[in-house]
Structure formats: structure tokens, C-alpha cells
Image (cartoon, rainbow, N blue to C red):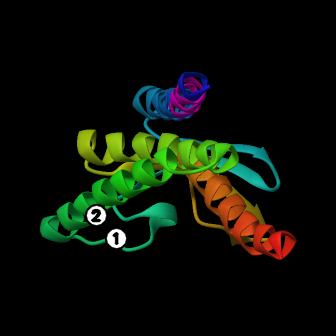
Amino acid sequence: MIKKQFILNFLIIFFIFFLDRTSKIYILNIAESQGIVDITLNPFLNIILVWNSGIGFGLLQFDERIAYNIITILIVIINFVIIYLLINSDSLRKILFSMILGGSFGNLYDRIYYSAVPDFIDLNYNGYHWFVFNVADIFISIGIFALIFFEIFGKKNEK
């Protein structure tokens, strides 16, 4: 049973990492061949390329290299904490931690390889735009929100 759970967690992490890398490579290829990425899919969704040197959704961006490196080291440390939590969690939480790790590894790869993370999904409504994000951010957000949901509502059910 433990071996099956390990394989499932690894497959989730790998699948999310692969999906994230594939989507980013596709967008970067468009940028390389056309010089710009500006695709309107519908009135609410655009594909544009933005380079994010901060953390999720472009927060905490710094021009200084030392700040960037400190944030990258903190992300690595947080990933080790998440791996520890994954190992010591129940099945549902293992899946959610695996989703978070898959996305985090995708963004960490970009931080190390490109020194920034390519974000490209632009949601908007009536001229108001959400932060530009990527596939990794989607899985990180789903995992975190689901963990919060289960912590809040799971505790009530136990009482």
C-alpha cells in the first residue's frame, strides 16, 4: 500500500511538472517565433507572456539579485517542508501536497533556469485583470485552497 501511494504521489508530481513545462515551452516557442505573445481566446481569457521574478502571481518582485536568491532559497526550504508533510499525511492530503509540489517544482525549475518564471494566463473582466499566472500556479492554488478547506471543515466533522 505504501509503495502504491508513493507511485501515485510521484506520478501526480511528475504529471503536473510535465504539463507545466510543456505549456511554458509552447508559449516560449510562440514568443521566439513571433516576437510577442498576445492571443485573445475570448473576452475573459488572454494568453500573454510576462516574466515573473517574484513569487506566485508576481508578488514580491525585486530588482536586486540577493533578494531573488533569498526568495529562491526560501522556496527550496518550503518544498522540503512540504515533502516532510507529504510523507507524514493521510492519503487525501498526500495528493494535495503532491499537487503543490508538482507546481512548485515547475516554477522552481524556471527560477533556476531562466532566473524568472514565465506566466501567461490572463483572466479579466470588463477591463479588470487578475494576476497573470501559469499552469503550476493553478495546481499550487488548488492544493492550498483544498488543504485550507479540509482543515476548516474537516475539523468540524471530527467534533
Q: Nearer the viewer, residue 43 or 70?
A: 70
Residue that numbered label 2 is attached to: 74
Which element is circle 2 on?
A: helix
Residue at image point 42% right, 48% down = 83
Q: Please indicate, yes or no, whether residue 128 appears anywhere in the rendered image.
A: yes
Mark identifier at residue 100:
none
Residue 57, above or below 107: below
Q: What amino acid type is highlighted by mark number 2? A: Leu
Residue at image point 43% right, 40% down = 106
User: Looking at the rendering, which quadrant does residue 159 occupy?
Assistant: bottom right
User: Looking at the rendering, which quadrant does residue 78 occupy?
Assistant: bottom left
Residue 142, position as x, y percentages in the image: 68, 54
- Range of magenta residues: 5-13
Which mark sits nearer the N-terminus, 2 or 1? 1
Residue 11, position as x, y percentages in the image: 56, 25
In magenta stretch: residue 11: yes
Q: What amino acid type is highlighted by mark number 1? A: Gln
Outermost residue, left side: 66
Residue 144 located left or right of residue 86 = right
* Pair 2/1: label in front: 2
Residue that numbered label 1 is attached to: 61
